[in-house]
Image (spheres, rainbow, N blue to C red):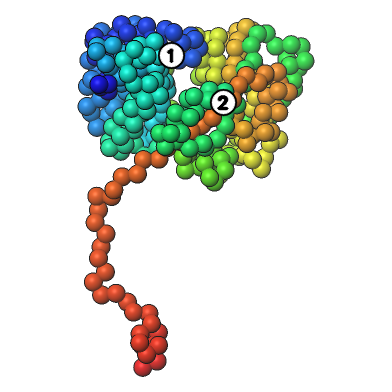
Amino acid sequence: MVKIRPIGPNDLKQVLALLETQPDEAFDYPGLGRFGPFYLPFHQISHWLPLKLTFLPGIFVAVEQKKVLGLVWISQDGANVARWKIDQLLLDPSRIAGIGPSALDVGRQLIDYVINTYGAKGVETFLAYVDNQYDQGLALLKECGFRHCARLQHYERAGAPSTAVTDLIETHSSHSLLREAKGFDRTKLSELYAETLPPEVRVSLRKTGADFFPGCCTKMLYQGFYKHWVLGEAEKVYLMGSVSIKSRDYRHFQMQVIVNPGWQDGLLALLAVALRHVYQTTREAVVTTNVFEFHGETAQALKLIGFEYNNTSQVLVRDYWSTSSRDSEAIRNPVLLFTNRGRTSPAFR
């Protein structure tokens, strides 16, 4: 019988071996790999804490006869404590084949376990980013109640910029409304992001201001490069766009650009100022960014400035519904709008 439980000390070696079968760029797990024996006690503590106090991702394994058949890795999606994402779902078909349950059955049990566990704690939305070509993974998640939400395109720019791209960066890297983001921009950044999302996905993918502008403690703990700019009026009434760039090793940079759908004039300025600071750090930078498929103008601007399309992921979402603990107030004296005599108002008496 397959048992699903949090990762334990006896599972660490098998879990690391399973994670190492994945490409280096597919998933980052430095904490578990470097500090495994010390990491696990804190993981156990985090697992039993209330949702708002959870400080580590959840790692759960499927075990049969002391063999790890698979694992699921789930973490909070940004600053929204009510939304979590499935970062990794790994199964070992070679170990499952001789035991009984199929790989899909084990995967289904892992997903159902984490959804029920974290849903009971208060998580309302679960996300999963799956490669568009991974049919088995898409089918498994949809069997577990996930639905298609959006498509996310991945772009990359590697190596030193050409002369044409350098000229383009220098030409567009200045704008009268361009400035560094400040703490008071948090709410406006959240509103700007919501405006770029279609109504049907806005509830599932919405973000808070803390997702775009981290606090002082987060900045102090983050060791690396981080810059954030916005395009907005001096009165701070609204923002028309923003771009952020960050890196831990000063070579691989992650960029995020947001532009109001009704105002695309400053898009190249945002991209140019971010790339200019990147290439001032290193000429051999690798810059990656993600763009929703419905942001066609942003994708065209990325190609113009030298980015190349890499692949597409599907964003799948599942909502967790729980029964409200508050009893609805009973209507003791209902209002009769239409009586037997057809009267609708005391004025007709």
* Kind of residue at disc 2: Asn
* Distance in Å between CA atoms under marks 2 and 1: 21 Å
Residue type highlighted by circle 1: Asp
Tag 2 and tag 1, C-beta contact below 8 Å: no
**Residue 142 location, x and y as percent?**
46, 34
Quarter residue 80 falls in? top left
Asked if one can make out residue 176 in the rendered structure from this viewpoint, the answer is no
Q: Is residue 39 left or right of residue 21?
A: left
* The quadrant where residue 120 appears: top left
Question: Badge 1: few (under 14), some or many (20 or more) residues near its Cα, within 10 Å?
Answer: few
Regarding mark 2 in the picture, which secondary structure is present there?
loop
Is tag 2's residue or tag 1's residue first in the polypeptide sequence?
1
Q: Position of residue 153 (x, y in %)?
A: 60, 26
The residue depicted at 62 percent of the width and 39 percent of the height is 260
Residue shown at 52% from the left, 41% from the top? 201
181 left or right of 113? Answer: right
Q: Nearer the viewer, mark 2 or mark 1?
A: 2
Which quadrant would the N terminus be assigned to in this image?
top left
Q: Secondary structure at mark 1?
A: loop
> How many marks overall?
2
What residue is at 65 percent from the left and 24 percent from the top? 271
* Residue 91 higher or lower than 125, as above or below: above
Question: Which label belongs to residue 28?
Answer: 1
Residue 132 bears which disc, if any?
A: 2
Give the class, few, some or many, for how many residues have Cα within 10 Å of label 2's Cα (few <14, many ≥20): some
